[in-house]
């Protein structure tokens, strides 16, 4: 019979490590998405008539929130692939 304390500690440690890895993977995906959105904005296909520094700052904050939201929903699957690579298991449970 196995002691329940060592099994519980092991599972809890693994779960905590997995959650930490998931947060890091989502953060990486958010940074990647933010860079991608920023690059698309820099293309500047049209001139912004009402543009100002304040508008750019607000747009940057909006892009950051959009990137975080996209990373949380797993829209692109980058975090999932990182979890599979570094977690040693499939990205989804």
Image (cartoon, grey):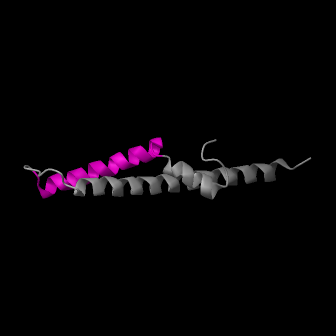
Is 27 positioned to the left or the right of 45 in the image? right
Q: Which residues are magenta?
A: 51-76
Residue 78 versus residue 26: which sits nearer the camera?
78
Q: Quadrant of residue 75?
A: top left
Residue 86: percent from the left, percent from the top?
61, 58
Residue 61: percent from the left, percent from the top?
27, 52
Residue at the image position 30 percent from the left and 50 percent from the top: 63
Residue 34 versus residue 3: which sits nearer the camera?
34
Residue at the image position 65 percent from the left and 50 percent from the top: 15
The answer to whether residue 91 is magenta is no
Is 19 positioned to the left or the right of 10 in the image? left
Is 44 positioned to the left or the right of 13 in the image? left
Principal secondary structure, stretch drawn in magenta: helix
Residue 80: percent from the left, percent from the top?
55, 48
Residue at the image position 49 percent from the left and 51 percent from the top: 78
The answer to whether residue 72 is magenta is yes
Is 3 positioned to the left or the right of 57 in the image? right
Residue 83: percent from the left, percent from the top?
58, 52
Residue 22 versus residue 33: which sits nearer the camera?
33
Residue occupying the far front of the picture: 45
């Amino acid at each position: 019979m196995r002691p329940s304390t060592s099994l519980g500690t092991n599972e809890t440690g693994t779960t905590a490590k997995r959650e930490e890895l998931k947060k890091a993977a989502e953060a990486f995906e958010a940074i990647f998405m933010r860079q991608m959105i920023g690059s698309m904005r820099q293309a500047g296909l049209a001139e912004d008539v009402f543009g100002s520094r304040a508008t750019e700052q607000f747009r940057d904050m909006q892009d950051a929130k959009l990137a975080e939201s996209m990373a949380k929903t797993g829209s692109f699957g980058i975090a999932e692939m990182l979890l599979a690579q570094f977690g040693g298991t499939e990205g989804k449970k």
